[in-house]
Image (cartoon, grey):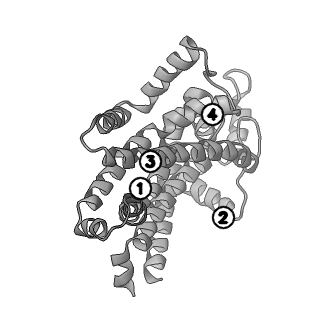
Amino acid sequence: MRRLAARSAYMLVIVAVSSVAVFYAIRLSGGDAVAAVIQPGSASLEAREQLRELWGLNLPIHEQYFDYMGRLLRGDLGNSLTNSSPISDMLIIHGRHSLILGVAALLIVFGLGIPLGILASLRRNGVVDASIMTLSVGGMAIPNFWLALLVVWLFASTLHWLPSAGCCGPKQLVMPAFVLAAEGLALTVRMTRSAMLESLDRDFVRTLRSGGLSEVRVIGRHVLRNAMVPLVSLAGLRIGQIVGYALVVETIFGWPGLGQVLVNAVLRRDYPVAQFFSLVLVILVIMGNWAADLGYQFANPRLRAARS
């Protein structure tokens, strides 16, 4: 319990520091939010200054930060500068799309990665093992934006099996979910194979086999249970990876999630939207790492014994 409280406090400190970094990075990156809304020459200088005053952009940056965080902590997420849409509505709509894409990618990462890793370990140094590991190396080596272009060229432009972009049916989900999951899938395969081989070489496995237990029971109940410990921490880290890669994948495939909204907000100098959704993505990454650390603590029996 003490460790949980310490990790939670540490996470809150990181969130606070990240909020300052995100706010200052966006505000000091150049550009003019007023110019993104009002075309140059279409309004007088006085009208433009009044708009800046209305939005609070004429205040010193530190005052803008405390004003923004005060409203945010009171539950006032604000509105978009470009279309006046409530950010709370944008979070619900686009957050749902990102959740669908993220869950689909995680299902691919672990639903396919763990069985392939187990199969590779059981067929060690064979053709199956070599084939699976070759694919996993490719998944780690190819950048996700390049992989996205390749799958669009192959499955959309050449074979015409899938749409190149859009939302939100199963066909539109296949390519972005696969691209988003590719590197995590490769890492999961390699880690599962490594953990399985390490467990298979231990003395307790030979003891169980000599005791007459079937191979299925030895693998399923004992070897796999030990191999799953490092995969628990991997699960939390994959959340952060998927959140980071979603920015690129959602933009390429036109998937209207949080990543695409953030990219568009930065390009349009829509400060409230860019600040809020940047902070949301940072919090998701931090929570993923926090969950990975806690999950590893609870999954590892030696650490559980040390706490008791």
Q: Residue furthest bottom?
A: 308
| Up-down relation of residue 294 to residue 30 (above or below) | below
Q: CA distance from mark 3 to mark 2?
A: 44 Å
Residue 88: % across, % down: 73, 51
- Check disc 1 and give the amino acid type: Leu
Q: Earlier in the sequence, mark 3 or mark 1?
A: 3
Q: CA distance from mark 4 to mark 3?
A: 22 Å
Q: Earlier in the sequence, mark 4 or mark 2?
A: 2
Residue for badge 4: 173
Residue at 41%, 58% (x, y): give it: 216
Q: Earlier in the sequence, mark 4 or mark 3?
A: 3
Q: Earlier in the sequence, mark 3 or mark 2?
A: 2
Residue for badge 1: 234
In this orientation, does residue 62 appear? yes
Q: CA distance from mark 1 to mark 4?
A: 24 Å
- Compare residues 159 and 209 and report the one nearer the observer: 209
- Compare residues 21 and 28 and report the one nearer the observer: 21
Classify mark 4: helix, strand or loop.
helix
| Up-down relation of residue 276 to residue 247 (above or below) | below
Kindly report which numbered mark, 4 or 3, lies closer to the viewer in this rendering: 3
- Check disc 3 and give the amino acid type: Pro
- Check disc 2 and give the amino acid type: Leu
Q: Residue furthest front?
A: 212
Residue at 66%, 64% (x, y): give it: 73
Q: Is residue 153 left or right of residue 220?
A: right
